[in-house]
Amino acid sequence: MTRATPTGWQAVHDEALRRIQTREWPPGARIPGEEDLAAELGCARATVNRALRELAEAGLLERRRKAGTRVAETPNRRAQMSISRIAEEIETRGARPGYALIAADDAPMPPARRHALGLGADTPTRHVEALHLADGAPYVHEDRWISLLAMPGAANADFTVMSANEWLLRHAPFSHGTLDYSATTAGDAAAHLGCDTQTPVMVLDRATFGPDHPITWVRLTYAPGFHLHMKI
Amino acid sequence: MTRATPTGWQAVHDEALRRIQTREWPPGARIPGEEDLAAELGCARATVNRALRELAEAGLLERRRKAGTRVAETPNRRAQMSISRIAEEIETRGARPGYALIAADDAPMPPARRHALGLGADTPTRHVEALHLADGAPYVHEDRWISLLAMPGAANADFTVMSANEWLLRHAPFSHGTLDYSATTAGDAAAHLGCDTQTPVMVLDRATFGPDHPITWVRLTYAPGFHLHMKI
DNA sequence: GGGGGTATTATGTCTATACATAAAGCCATC
DNA sequence: GATGGCTTTATGTATAGACATAATACCCCC
């Protein structure tokens, strides 16, 4: 019995990955069926299934019933990034997080945004503007609107100490959303970020939805020099 | 027996997600054990395990042996993005992809990059510069170095028709790597992108590694107006 | 040869059972 | 009270067996 690795689905995963990387299983080729692999590696089919499923989710394999499993020709690998509290993000970068509320008012959401979000003109919202600091220096400018329909509690929440970002993470129902990064000039945020209005900066527009309703829309304008780092 | 949904791990997943979203299981709370849930929902423990594992991988639950499963207080949700062929990326945006090679030569990799990649000064590399088009308009400028140590075939490859991006996807062993997005001025790429050198643009620096050696380093400078879109 | 229905087959999933493993909590000891 | 080891327990994983499902491949018929 040829069993280089001990056992376990991870060992099968690694062995399959090795065969893909060494082109023992070249791109486009059909690989042995689960039963065959299980017999060869001395484990149950479920174990092989788990391993191959992970590789398929990572985009390295393509699986179809009856057709079998093939090595992806041009793998669409997925990059992952964790969306977390801004304070945590700053700590991860090895800096001391800070926070300063700029304004909390009832300024209306720009009509274009309201439309894109599917919010009616009569939906009450709260507007919060704040600055997050890293070691005392501006890190990111937050310009946010919260739907009071979805989050009535936001009307009375105190955002002077806890940021709206964190308040929502704690109080909003888990949800889905969209992220949209783009490069632009600092513009109005320049004054808060301590740079010129023409300086190129990264902007993140994020819309967040609950099970039913839109919850919040935020524009984060990062200070110059910001890098968005991801791993494959 | 209360079984709102048919059966299957996905049903269990959805039911658990519903309880999290409705705060029936509030943040920080410990949820019932796998055996209890299996009994309640009328399925096997393995089915519950699969469902809860997916939710944990999505960052909504935190699982620890003996301690049990808790709803995450501040969920670190992971945003996903698929890294694919540039041509495919352009097609996804509903445009006709185009490609034009600018230069393929032996220009040395900038020392700082070579260092960061862990490549020795004597490692031979090939340099490729190209422009990708969407409906005939500049989409992204590609400035790439390929290690001939890892990819000897790149020395003789013809990049006039197939881009280095695609060539590598087809010929390089699957691997891991890092992505680094930042905002900067168009600079040298401005001439190719048809914009001013001071225009803010998105830049992606990507390093790719094989099982052993670094394979390639590329700087992609996107045309103004580019948006990086992700979903949570 | 083309069209359509059917048998075959590889993956997808569920089940029940068993053992492995991490770690929380308890207890005895110092 | 602190410390170290032991017990308990919830999750992690493996297994064999079974059925579900999708879709290819084949065959029959026209």
Image: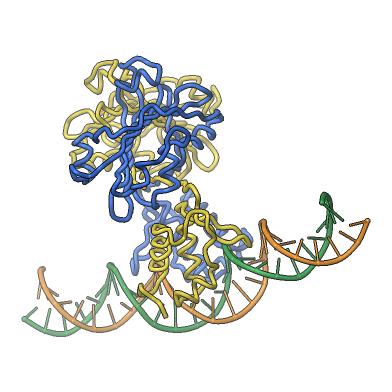
Chain colours: A yellow, B blue, C green, D orange
Look at 54% across and 72% down and name the residue there. Answer: A35
Q: In what quadrant of the picture does the N terminus of chain A appear?
A: bottom left
**How far from the left and from the top, in percent, is residue B52?**
46, 60
Total marks drawn?
Answer: 0
**How far from the left and from the top, in percent, is residue B174?**
40, 52
- Mark yes or no: residue B149 visible: yes
Look at 37% across and 65% down and name the residue there. Answer: B68
Within the image, what quadrant is residue B160 found in? top left
The answer to which of A198 and B100 lies nearer the viewer is B100
Within the image, what quadrant is residue B94 found in? top right
Please determine whether, in this image, residue B136 is positioned above or below residue B32. Answer: above
Look at 44% across and 20% down and name the residue there. Answer: A108
Please determine whether, in this image, residue B133 is positioned above or below residue A168. Answer: above
**How far from the left and from the top, in percent, is residue B82?**
45, 43
The answer to which of A128 and A19 lies nearer the viewer is A19
Q: In this view, does A94 lie to the left or right of C2?
A: left
**How far from the left and from the top, in percent, is residue A123?**
52, 26
- Mark yes or no: residue A229 visible: no
Look at 31% across and 49% down and name the residue there. Answer: B150
